[in-house]
């Protein structure tokens, strides 16, 4: 049985309209709202998440009356998977009926005015991962060979998110997300390079999914939780434990913002 047939049978053709990929430490939303939860290990052609802070479940739920499918944890290029494998769930969401994809992550601050626990709307990205998920044979049923990338992160969704944040009294940052392959954190010299190139935050995910979502004609909104100062910006050594701790501190405003955005879509 293929992935789509399996999921439609398991969910009784749930037909979600919004997809959300929950990054490190941000998976609690899928615990709060959960009608059906399916471990990745049970889904045909899905790969199992191995990173701490990622439960590895596909969760179907209604949030403020909208049918949503959430990835409670993602897979990463640095785990040894191919770009095609880590972006496969985005193609699945498209075929399930998703029209809008909200991408979230924990990221290090490159912009020195950003503070840990800030939320940043992604306005654009720089792919420094050394690979592209569209490499290889093209699937004409999903998208065209040479997709336009001039507005991956939709301005209308950024404006909608800003309006929701204003109503909630949440201050948002905006900026460019710089994606590296990982799993090692960046050196101070690499962070200086990223800043010169126009980056505001740096991480190890999101960009492959955003590229494929845009290719599939999904409307994309990206939100980074600033979890730490990047290498050379702060004085402390970087750790994944710090990332989880800070995202835990900001999860309440993150959840409230996501719920308001879903309701407004």
Image: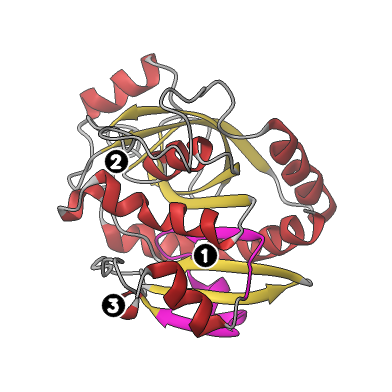
The stretch of residues the image draws in magenta is 14-38
At horizontal 55% and vertical 30% (from top left) the residue drawn is 175
- Residue 121 is tagged as none
Q: Which residue is mark 2?
A: 235
Against 110, residue 238 (above or below) is below
Given the current orientation, which residue lies at the most extreme right position?
A: 167
Q: Nearer the viewer, residue 156 or 225?
A: 156
Count of number-bearing discs = 3
Indicate the secondary structure of the residue bearing disc 3: helix
Q: Earlier in the sequence, mark 2 or mark 1?
A: 2
How far separated are the C-alphas under marks 2 and 1?
A: 20 Å
At horizontal 30% and vertical 58% (from top left) the residue drawn is 75
Dot 2 crowding, Cα within 10 Å, few <14, some 14–19, many 20+? few
State whether residue 237 appears in this view.
Answer: no
- On the image, the x and y values in percent for residue 182 come to 21, 43
How far separated are the C-alphas under marks 3 and 2?
A: 40 Å
Q: Which residue is mark 1?
A: 249
Is 22 on the left-hand or right-hand side of 121?
left
Q: Quadrant of the N terminus?
A: bottom left
At horizontal 70% and vertical 31% (from top left) the residue drawn is 155
Q: Earlier in the sequence, mark 3 or mark 1?
A: 3
At horizontal 46% and vertical 59% (from top left) the residue drawn is 92
Dot 1 crowding, Cα within 10 Å, few <14, some 14–19, many 20+? some
Q: Which residue is mark 3?
A: 41
Is 43 on the left-hand or right-hand side of 96?
left
Against 155, residue 246 (above or below) is below
Dot 3 crowding, Cα within 10 Å, few <14, some 14–19, many 20+? few
Which of the two marks, 2 or 1, is nearer to us in this view?
Answer: 1
**Is 25 in the magenta?**
yes
């Amino acid at each position: 049985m293929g992935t789509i047939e399996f999921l439609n049978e398991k969910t009784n053709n749930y037909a979600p309209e919004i997809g959300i990929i929950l990054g490190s430490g941000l998976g609690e939303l899928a615990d709060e709202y959960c009608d059906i939860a399916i471990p990745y290990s049970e889904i045909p052609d899905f790969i199992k998440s191995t990173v701490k802070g990622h439960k590895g479940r596909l969760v179907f739920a209604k949030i403020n009356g909208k049918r949503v499918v959430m990835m409670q944890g993602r897979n990463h290029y640095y785990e040894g998977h191919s770009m095609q494998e880590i972006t496969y769930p985005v193609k699945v969401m498209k075929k399930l009926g998703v029209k809008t994809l909200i991408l979230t992550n924990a990221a290090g601050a490159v912009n020195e005015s950003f503070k840990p626990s800030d939320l940043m709307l992604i306005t654009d990205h720089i792919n420094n991962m050394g690979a592209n998920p569209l490499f290889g044979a093209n699937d004409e049923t999903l998208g065209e060979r040479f997709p336009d990338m001039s507005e991956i992160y939709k301005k209308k969704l950024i404006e909608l998110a800003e309006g929701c944040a204003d109503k909630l009294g949440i201050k948002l940052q905006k900026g460019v997300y710089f994606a590296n392959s990982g799993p090692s954190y960046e050196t101070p010299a690499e962070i200086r390079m990223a800043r010169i190139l126009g980056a505001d935050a740096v991480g190890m995910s999101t960009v492959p999914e955003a590229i494929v979502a845009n290719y599939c004609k999904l409307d994309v909104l990206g939100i980074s939780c600033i979890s730490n100062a990047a290498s050379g910006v702060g004085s402390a050594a970087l750790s994944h434990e710090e990332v989880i701790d800070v995202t835990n501190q900001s999860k309440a405003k993150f959840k409230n913002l996501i719920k308001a955005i879903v309701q407004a879509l």
